[in-house]
Amino acid sequence: MNNLLIIGQYVPTNSIVHRMDPRIKMLIIFFYVIFIFFANNVFSYALFTVFAIGGTLLTKVPWRFIAKGLTPVWFLIVFTFILHLFVTKEGTVLVNIFGLPIYSGALEQGAVISLRFFLLILLTSLLTLTTTPIEITDGVESLLGPLRRFKFPVHELALMMSISLRFIPTLLQETEKISNAQASRGVDFRTGPFRERVRAVIPLLVPLFVSAFKRAEELAMAMEARGYRGGEGRTKLRELRVMKRDVAALILFIVVVAAALITRDYS
Amino acid sequence: MDITFEQVDYTYQANSPFEHKALKDLSFHLPGGSFTAIVGHTGSGKSTLLQHLNGLVRPTSGSVRIGGHTLEPNKKPKQAKELRKQVGIVFQYPEHQLFEETVEKDIAFGPRNFGVPEKEIHKRVEESAEAVGLDLSLLSRSPFELSGGQMRRVAIAGVLAVRPRVLVLDEPTAGLDPRGQREIMDMFHRLHKEQELTTILVTHSMEDALTYADHMLVLDKGEKYMEGPPVEVFQQRQALQKVQLDVPEIFQFLQKVSERFGKTVVYEGEDIDRLAKQLADLAGERE
Ligand SMILES: Nc1ncnc2c1ncn2[C@@H]1O[C@H](COP(=O)(O)OP(=O)(O)OP(=O)(O)O)[C@@H](O)[C@H]1O
Ligand SMILES: [Mg+2]
C-alpha cells in the first residue's frame, strides 16, 4: 500500500488521544482551523504550536512516521516559504541574493504562513491517525444530528461515508493483486510510450470495476438479508460518550484559544 | 530452470508501524524439472514467496536466482519481461484478472504482450483451451457470462498459452468442484511431464502434495519449517500438527494400523496393491 501519504491512515497505539470522543476531536480541530487565523504575534503562535505538538506527542505515533507521511506536504510548505521570500516587499532589505533583495517582512510572512500551514496539516492528520473510520462516521452522524429536523439524510450520508471508508483498503489490495496478475501476463505499467501505458490501464480497470460492482451488490443483499431498513429507530452498539478526558481536552483548548486571543496584537 | 533462494527476507511496508516480516532467512534449491509443493498455515508467506519467482517483488535482503536471472535488493532485474515470459503464475482466484470482450482475446492477451507472432497465437489459444477442458464454442463468448469454474479455466489457459518454462500455481483448484479439481491437477501434472516444466504448487490439500509433488517445502510464519520428499515429510505427523497441518489420509490410516498391530507399516509411495499385500501379511501373522 501507499506509505507516502499518511492522510487517512489509522495507527493503533491506543493512546489517550485515540480513546477520546471523536466528536470532541473534530470540534477541536474545526475551531483550531478557524482560530489559528487570529494569531498574529510570537506568543499567540507559540500557544497554537505547543498545542499541536503536544497533541502529536500524546498520540504516541512515532515522529519519524508522521514526518515521512507529510513528505508531499513538506514540499508545499517549503515552496510557499520561498515564494514569499521573493515576492513580498515589506520591511528593510536584509541581503541580496543574485541581485534579488530579500526583505525582513518577507522572511517574517513566509515563516508565519508556512508555520500555519504546517500546523493545520499536522493537526488534521492527527484525526485520521488516531480515529478509526467507524468512529469518524459515528461522530459525523452525531454532530450533524440536528440537521435531521430539516429532512437532511444524516444517517444515509454517514452510512455512505462508512462504506466508502471501509472499502478503500479493500480496493487498494484488489488493485495490487490485479496489477500483479496482469504484470505477470506481460503488461508493462511503468515503461514504454505514453499511449501504451494508458492502454495498459484497461486490463486493470475493467476487473476492478467488475469486482467493485459485484461487491456492492453482495453487500446490499447481505444487508437486506440481515434486516437493514435504514436509520429509523436504529440504535448503536457503541454509544459515543463524553468522558472526563474529553472535557479536560476541551477546557485546555478553550484556555489556549482564550490566551491566544488575549495576547494577540489588536493595534 | 533451477530456482535458488539464499537467505531471503521480505518485509511488507518496511520502516512504518505496519512493518511486517513475511519471509525470514529463507534458503532452498529447486532443481529444474522438479515438482514442488509448498504448504503452510494461512498467512505463512506462501503467496509472498511466489511473487519473488517472476520479479514482482524483490527480496528485502538475500538473493533469488531463477535460471539465469538474479533478483537482489535495490537492483532492478535486467530483462524482467523475459523472466515473466518464462515463469507463468496462476494466482489465487485467477478469474479476477479476466477483462477482454471474448474468451479468445483474453487467452491471447499474454502471448500477444510477450510478442508471439499473430499466426501462432490462434493455434496456442485453441491448444490451451483444449488443455484446460474448455469447449471451443466458448471462445467467442464473453468471459463474464461463464460459470465460476469455466472462468477459472479461461484464466489458467491464459497463463499456459505463453508456454512458460516454470509453472507457478497458487491454490489453482480452490473452490472448484471435486471432479474439476482432479481434472485440472491431472492436466498440470501431464503438462509438467510432457514439457519438462519446473512446477511449484501452493496448496492446502495434503493429498495433492502427496500425489503430484516430488519435493515439499513446509513454511511456518515466513520461515522454512521442513523440506524433503512428501513421503518423508508426512512421516512426521506430530511436527506437522504443531503448525496446524494434517497428513494425508493414507498416513493416518497406516498409523492406526500400526497401533493396532503393534508393528509399523511405512508408506513409501508404493502402489495400493503392494500396500494391500503388506497389510494382508500383517493380518495373516496375527491369526
Ligand atoms: N500487501 C501486504 N501488505 C502488508 N502485509 C501483507 C501484504 N500481503 C500479505 N501480507 C502479510 O504477509 C503475511 C504472509 O501473507 P501471504 O499472502 O504470503 O500468506 P499465504 O501463506 O499465501 O496465506 P494464504 O494461505 O491465506 O493464502 C500475512 O501475515 C499477511 O498479512
Ligand atoms: Mg496465499
Image (cartoon, rainbow, N blue to C red):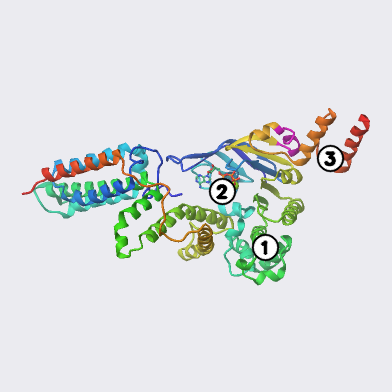
Which residue ends up furthest to the left in the rendered image? A267
In front of the other: label 1 or label 3?
A: 1
Q: Chain of mark 3?
A: B
Camera-side residue of B25 and B243 = B243
Quadrant of residue B266 in the image? Answer: top right
What residue did someone put label 3 on? B270
- On screen, residue B140 above or below A221: below
Tag 2 and tag 1 share a subunit? yes
Which mark is on residue A30?
none
- What's the distance in space between the residues labelled 2 and 3, CA to CA? 38 Å
What is the x, y in percent for residue B184? 72, 55
Do the residues at discs 2 and 3 belong to one chain? yes
Quick check: can you spot residue B214?
Answer: yes
Q: Residue at x 38, y 60 (%)?
A: A157
For discs 2 and 3, the disc positioned in front in the rendered view = 3
Q: Chain of mark 1?
A: B
Could you tell me which secondary element the residue under label 1 belongs to? helix
Identify which residue, B113 or A63, lies in the foreground.
Answer: A63
Residue at mark 1: C-beta within 8 A of ligand 2: no
Q: Which residue is mark 2?
A: B55
Residue at 19% from the left image edge and 52% from the top image edge: A84
Mark before the other along the chain sequence, 2 or 3: 2
Q: Quadrant of ligand 1?
A: top right
Chain ID, mark 2: B
Above or below, comparing residue B57 to residue B148 in the picture: above
Residue B110, image x, y percentages: 61, 61
Mark found first going from the N terminus, 2 or 1: 2
Q: Is residue B233 magenta?
A: yes
Toward the front, the furthest residue is: A233
